Amino acid sequence: MTGTFITFEGGEGAGKSTHIRLVADHLKSKGHAVVVTREPGGTEQGEGVRALLVTGDVRRWTPMAEALLNYAARDAHLNTVIRPALAAGKIVLCDRFMDSTRAYQGYAGGLDLAFIDELERRVVGRTVPRLTLIFDLDPVDGLRRARQRGEGAPAAAEDRFEHKELVFHQRLRDGFRAIAEADPGRCRVVDATRSLAVVGADVLGHVMDAVDG
Ligand code: TMP
């Protein structure tokens, strides 16, 4: 039995984490076995890598180092969480996955896309998501939302990438759109400017198509 692998992607403050929770609740209420996880993270090793990546000075890592750290965490995540859950027939909902490396480190960070192709081929292999939802939003609005969310957060706020300049976030948005265009069978762009209810209905429609299809 093989499960269904669905990933949620997009820039900062686009609301993907909220929608993952809503989708998970819906699927569980219908009796599906669901695993909700995230990257970087999802394992003890991965959460350790996450702490290194998302906190601290914005120049702490080069895009190359970020890609390698994310891929080290991804390898552990695939082997110990994602592949076993899929093999057991579960639905895996993952908050960010391989497209975040391509968009953040590749398109926005300037890392060679051919190198990212090679990492994908060797680490992700055939465990490519069946569906990827790309939450699309003007980065000016997304960063505003992300900063509002972070207000009052503890000192070790997970805001390292939010401190990159606006043009980084614009390249990021274009990068995610390019990824969607290159793989229309897998990716759906979700207009995240709309209300929570409208976005939620759109997201659920795509998810149920993937789960039933
Ligand atoms: P978030 O998912 O809570 O937004 O935080 C994760 C941050 O890590 C986000 O700014 C995007 C970044 N990231 C990368 O730069 N590359 C990656 O491969 C992944 C998974 C995340």
Image: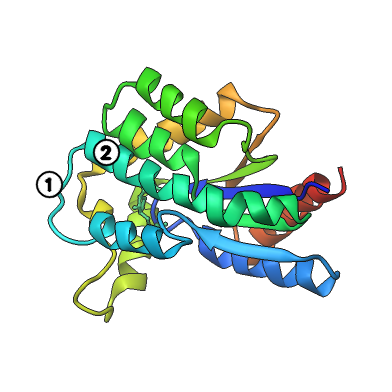
Say which residue label 1 marks.
59
Say which residue label 2 marks.
168
* Gap between marks 2 and 1 measured at Cα: 13 Å
Helix, strand or loop status at disc 2 = helix
Which residue is rendered at x = 24% and y = 34% of the image?
Answer: 64
Q: Nearer the viewer, mark 2 or mark 1?
A: 1
Using residue 23 as the reference point, say whether residue 55 is left or right of it: left
| Res 175 quadrant in image | top left
Q: Earlier in the sequence, mark 2 or mark 1?
A: 1
Query: Looking at the image, can residue 113 be seen?
Result: yes
- Counting from the top left corner in percent of width and height, residue 209 is at 82, 46
Helix, strand or loop status at disc 1 = loop
- Counting from the top left corner in percent of width and height, residue 148 is at 33, 71
Tell me how many marks there are: 2
Residue placed most toward the observer, 121 or 206: 121
- Counting from the top left corner in percent of width and height, residue 52 is at 24, 58
- Is the residue marked by circle 2 packed among few (<14), some (14-19), or many (20+) residues within 10 Å? some
